[in-house]
């Protein structure tokens, strides 16, 4: 997962953009306006979300939240407000940390029209966290210790919520980076920041991510749990699982889009070899994969779906047997298992893991 490093701050605020006012849009939603009165460090209704290491994933999350808050008339936004538990306070200001001036161009390109609301200030991670109510850690795994052990960071994070989307980095490792040790004591008693581990994926950019949130011990207070879920619901679907499953979740959900993209490429190449134009083949293959996934999400078991399409003596069974001869099932399963092992090692700061596995 890419991150832009440990230094630099980009402040993303709701300002007038092309005649619209994003901050006004947020509070025009009745279901949000009535729940935004809790006081905090930034005023009666403001909440600041800081992203440390705002690379591809961090930008996608910011973009998803900004787009979601700006959709005051969309059916999707209206139904989401009715179905989910809206937190008592929502983010209204955003701080995104970057390392290089080029990162500003990347943010502007990714956020599009919303980038006009972005102001960039570099080299001030600690101050960015001091201003925050919630901190999202999205750097590369090997950079976690350097960022969280920075002078003044422990004090800046005191009593706040830290959400990590760093692959392979457990909450205990985050605690050790900030405090020098891990503690099972309730942060409400110890004064330490609350730490939550989550794993979104690259489809965050189009708000189709599958995000896995690790359950905490002790359990998160209801309002904080609702806030974490709300943040990741802006970019797709959310499921909560025990922390022990996070490396496998990283392999399946984090690496999964690359695995599925490779399968798509293979199907497209086969179609092109048989005479289909590449552009049309790509569209057809992608829509076919999406349709199959939608059927599974609607409750169809993959094996039953496969069997329904497989008629005796037909082309489907012929193709399936070729896939079975090529051990596609075992190879794909092994890829997920391998990615799980690599994810667990990345969190320990081990580099070159793939080169030592065989």
Image: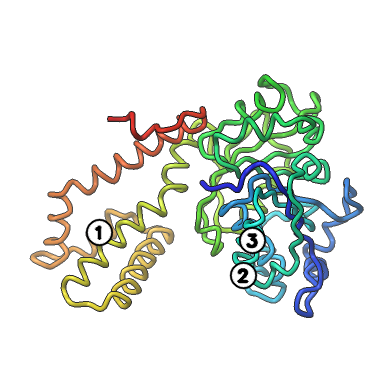
Q: Name which of mark 1 and mark 2 comes first in the sequence.
A: 2
Callouts 1 and 3 close, C-beta under 8 Å: no
User: What is the quadrant of residue 186 in the picture?
Assistant: top right
Residue 126 vertical position relative to residue 206 in the rendered view, above or below: above
User: What is the quadrant of residue 102 in the picture?
Assistant: bottom right
User: What is the quadrant of residue 198 in the picture?
Assistant: top right
Residue at point 32%, 30% (across, down): 357
SS for callout 1? helix
Residue at point 16%, 73% (across, down): 274
Residue at point 27%, 30% (across, down): 358
The picture places residue 189, in percent across and down from the top left corner, at 81, 25
- The residue that label 3 is drawn on is 107
Q: Which mark is residue 306?
A: 1
In this orientation, does residue 237 appear?
A: yes
Whole-angstrom CA distance, mark 1 to mark 2, is 31 Å
In this orientation, does residue 223 appear?
A: no
Q: Is residue 90 left or right of residue 139?
A: right
Residue at point 78%, 69% (across, down): 22
């Amino acid at each position: 997962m890419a991150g832009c490093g440990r230094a630099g701050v980009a402040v993303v605020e709701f300002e007038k953009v092309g005649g619209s006012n994003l901050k006004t849009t947020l509070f025009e939603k009745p279901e949000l306006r009535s729940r935004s009165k809790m006081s905090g460090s930034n005023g009666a209704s403001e909440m600041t979300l800081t992203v440390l290491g705002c690379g591809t994933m961090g930008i996608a999350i910011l973009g998803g939240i900004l787009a979601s808050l700006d959709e005051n008339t969309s059916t999707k936004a209206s139904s989401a407000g009715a179905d989910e538990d809206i937190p008592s306070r929502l983010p209204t200001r955003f701080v995104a940390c970057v390392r290089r001036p080029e990162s500003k161009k990347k943010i502007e390109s990714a956020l599009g029209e919303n980038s006009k609301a972005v102001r960039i200030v570099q080299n001030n991670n600690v101050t960015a966290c001091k201003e925050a109510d919630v901190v999202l850690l999205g750097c590369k795994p090997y950079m976690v210790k350097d960022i969280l052990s920075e002078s003044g960071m422990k004090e800046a994070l005191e009593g706040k919520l830290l959400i990590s989307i760093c692959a392979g980095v457990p909450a205990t490792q985050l605690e050790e980076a900030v405090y020098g040790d891990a503690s099972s004591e309730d942060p409400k008693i110890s004064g330490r920041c609350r730490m939550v581990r989550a794993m979104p994926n690259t489809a965050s950019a189009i708000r189709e991510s599958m995000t896995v949130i690790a359950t905490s011990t002790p359990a998160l207070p209801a309002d904080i749990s609702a806030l974490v879920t709300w943040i990741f619901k802006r970019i797709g679907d959310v499921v909560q699982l025990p922390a022990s499953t996070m490396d496998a979740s990283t392999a399946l959900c984090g690496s999964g889009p690359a695995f599925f993209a490779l399968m798509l490429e293979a199907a497209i190449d086969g179609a092109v070899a048989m005479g289909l134009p590449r552009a049309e083949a790509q569209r057809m293959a992608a829509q076919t994969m999406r349709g199959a996934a939608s059927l599974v999400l609607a409750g169809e078991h993959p094996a039953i779906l496969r069997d329904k399409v497989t008629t005796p003596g037909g082309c489907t069974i012929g193709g399936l047997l070729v896939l079975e001869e090529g051990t596609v099932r075992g190879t794909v399963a092994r890829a997920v298992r391998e990615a799980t092992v690599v994810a667990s090692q990345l969190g320990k700061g081990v580099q070159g893991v793939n080169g030592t596995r065989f």
